[in-house]
Amino acid sequence: MENILPLIVVALGVVVLLFLITKLEINTFISLVITAFLVALGLGMPLEEIVESIQGGMGGTLGSIALIFGFGAILGKLVADAGGAQRIAGTLIDKFGEKHIQWAVVIASFIIGIALFFEVGLVLLIPIVFQIAKQLKVSPLYLGIPMATALSVTHGFLPPHPGPTVIAQQYDANIGMVLVYGIILSIPAVIIAGPLFAKIIQKMIPDSFNKTGNIDSLGETKTFKIEETPGFGISVLTSLLPVILMAISTVVELIQDLGHVENNVFFKIIYLIGEPTTALLISVLLAVYTMGVKRNIPMKQVMASAEESIRSIGMMLLIIGGGGVLKQVLIDGGVGDSVAALFADSHMSPLLLAWLIAAILRIALGSATVAALTTAGLVIPLMQGSGIDPALMVLATGAGSLIASHVNDAGFWMFKEFFGLTLKETFSTWTLLESVISVVGLVGVLVINMFV
């Protein structure tokens, strides 16, 4: 019974959080901190330790990812404002042609999705998708599903996105291995939940593919003449540089381990460059040159773009910090230990359990990032002695946190409004495709775990 009581407190905490956000319409960050206080009291934490735990959760979470998040936002904004994202999409669409247009959209969205946060990528790519759909006389949804899938997969599985980056830090996972495994998972997830799913669902609910959609809410979107944009190669290199640098560092580390080579200055420099913060700083400096200075854009204008990107992520940073606060309270209040004790005699894989808890929290809370962070607080004790690669725990949690996006998730409403769908049609398309990504991610993690 004493193992069940903390879990009841957590369940009541989730109900309170839902009530504060949905019924009272209190800001998510404020709601998270209020819930953390109430859960801490419910768990019987000493009063003098509650504030310390809350401050520790906030500092511990943001201390490691604020730089990554900030540099990531700046990089994406510089590439978008210079027309680099438009050049990537336009070039791939021209190369693939009308017959393979879905695959062009998938690849373009995947590349752009690595550099841009989900909502930003969606707002940037939607006008391009609508423009292509109009030219080719195809349904916007026919192209919208592959686009949204690629953006969602990068958001859930790949650093430097906030979810996988934060959870990697919480689980003490090698972020390079998260990236390597994440890319392996992303390929089947994008193919199955993107073009294949779009073809199947078009046969099941053809009416939703007859909708013209509405992007008036985006206002006048900035479009460039192709000659005004940076080159395709430099746009791709600038967008993918953080991933390339982190991947190189991981490959070098694997070679060093396999060859039993002693550490030296060369390896230390490579590992420093491969750190997410360093990789993103180098990428931002490259973007300032390739997307600004090289194209004779005044430095003042380039820096204005950078400042605007930071303003737009301020509240998101606080929400991630709030998720970290709740996670820390769960750990300090002994909830993780209760979960570990409850499943002590269970043969369920920690990977499956992490996915399951993240999935339940995602359905309850809406935010994938908050669901993933809260899951970390519950399952960290289960990892001890399990022999599970922490990088796979990150991806199992990330996969669970993507499942069944519905009415409490902003992405659900964005997708619904842009493509002019009814609620039922949005559940049948957006909610289902997110669930397909989640399940494919879990299966992929379990398969990889058999070989590592």
Image: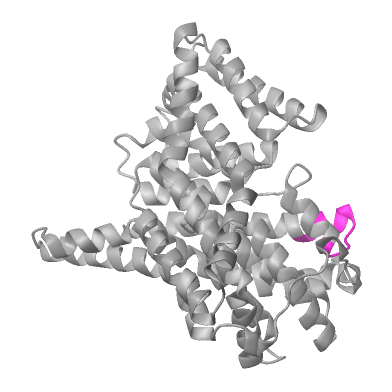
Res 118 visible: yes
Res 441 visible: no
Name the residue: 38% across, 54% down. 277
The residue lying toward the viewer, choosing from 225 and 156, is 225
Occupied quadrant, residue 23? top right
Magenta stretch encompasses residue 419? yes
* Rendered-image quadrant of the C terminus: bottom left
The residue lying toward the viewer, choosing from 282 and 204, is 282
| In the displayed structure image, the side of residue 189 where residue 426 appears, left or right | right
Please say if 338 is above or below 302.
above
What colour scheme governs how the chains and residues are painted in the rendered image of this protein?
one colour
| In the displayed structure image, the side of residue 288 where residue 194 appears, left or right | right
| Whole-percent x, y for residue 257 in the image | 17, 60
The residue lying toward the viewer, choosing from 55 and 446, is 55
| Whole-percent x, y for residue 299 in the image | 52, 68
| Whole-percent x, y for residue 25 in the image | 79, 31
Residue extent of the magenta highlight: 418-429
Magenta stretch encompasses residue 81? no
Number of disc labels:
0
Name the residue: 40% across, 60% down. 281
Occupied quadrant, residue 152? bottom right
Q: Main secondary structure of the magenta part?
A: helix
Name the residue: 54% across, 41% down. 372
The residue lying toward the viewer, choosing from 446 and 332, is 332
Please say if 248 is above or below 100.
above
Please say if 347 is above or below 224.
above
| In the displayed structure image, the side of residue 152 where residue 432 appears, left or right | right
